[in-house]
Image (cartoon, rainbow, N blue to C red):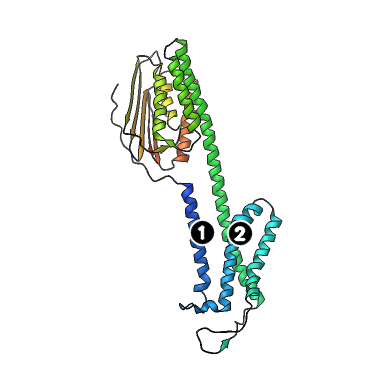
Amino acid sequence: MVNQKAIPRYLSNSNTIFSLKYANKNQWLLYGSGSILFLFIPIFTSPDFNWNTGFFHIHPFQRSLISYTFLLLFFYAQMFVFLPKFYFAKRLIIFWICILISFLVCALLPIALLPTTYHMHPFKTGGAYPPPPDNGLVFLLTRNLFQFLVVGFFSYSLQVNAQWKSAERARTDAELGYLKAQINPHFLFNTLNSIYSLAIQHSDKTADAVVQLSSMMRYVLSEASKDFVSLQKEIEYISDYISLQQTRLSDNVDFSYEISGEAGNQLIAPMLLIPFIENTYKYGVNPDENCEIKINFIITPRELQMHTFNKKVKFRSIHSESNKMGIENTRKRLLSLYPKQHKLLIHDEGNSFSIFLSIALK
């Protein structure tokens, strides 16, 4: 085996990959904190506010606190019921009826529950003060309408943003599913070609190659549909693929395959590296030429580095097109799954082709 020269290490962003599960927890924590702060608004803005909390017994404050509570309930009702079930479902009549009823409840029910009356001031001995002169029904409705519109617009903005993010996730998942569907038949086609070559030569290795292919296809069927798989299994899959390819290589191939480091509990997107490995064989193997192929993996707790190198040989045009498709698909998957967490360098020179890839591991 030919020793591979040291591969330069490149800096990469190893931040933890964003997890939707934790995002949901943080989202609900944000909603809870925001709700508490919202209910503190009528407390700290009350003209009768006092740390003795005696103002809790004053009807205007109680009415204001009830009004803010109804506004908060309206916020969540519109966020999780009115908008997704009626507005975005184009059931606009029902939506606007719900909005009107919600406004009437928020604006009138607190007044009905606690009508404005003369009341004793809790911090003064004797005497009562009248309600403010501008607390007529029109004024209260106008003030409550402004608060209602602000809360409604805020919940609408949050829901539209959530809908947009959901659509983006669905689009990304669909694209990744399409890319995986392209990669798997591409792999099967190449591997069957290798076994076909063995069968033509009546090689004793044909049966072993079929067993290896069966094991590899089992991995593809069980793991390729997952978002992330064990790095150890992915490396074993690649090693099986290389072993299968080696059965058809002749003595004119100077071949090197090395793995430095150990795969622990790290995770990686499935079928992400195999197109680059396939590329070295498609571009680098020709029985009529002296060939050279080098494949090197460096594994650290936070990063995976891969370097492939091959001398260019003459190949059929169909290989060129299939390789372009495989590498382009992988480039798109890297951009989708590892944004700012990978580095891909491709050197296509006159008589050689090399790839360096570093990925931040989970």
The amino acid marked with disc number 1 is Tyr
Q: Is any part of residue 3 visible from this angle? A: yes
Residue 102 locus on image (x, y percent)? 65, 64
In the displayed structure image, the side of residue 60 where residue 300 appears, left or right: left
Front-lying residue, 135 or 263:
263
The amino acid marked with disc number 2 is Ala
Q: In which quarter of the image is the N terminus?
A: top left
Residue 124 locus on image (x, y percent)? 51, 87
Callout 2 crowding tier (Cα within 10 Å): few <14, some 14–19, many ≥20:
some
Please tell me which residue is depicted at 44% across the width and 33% down the height of the picture: 272
Q: Going from the N terminus, do you reach mark 1 or mark 2 first?
A: 1
Residue receiving disc 1: 31
Give the spatial CA distance, label 1 vs label 2: 13 Å
Residue receiving disc 2: 77
Front-lying residue, 13 or 187:
187
Residue 48 locus on image (x, y percent)? 51, 79
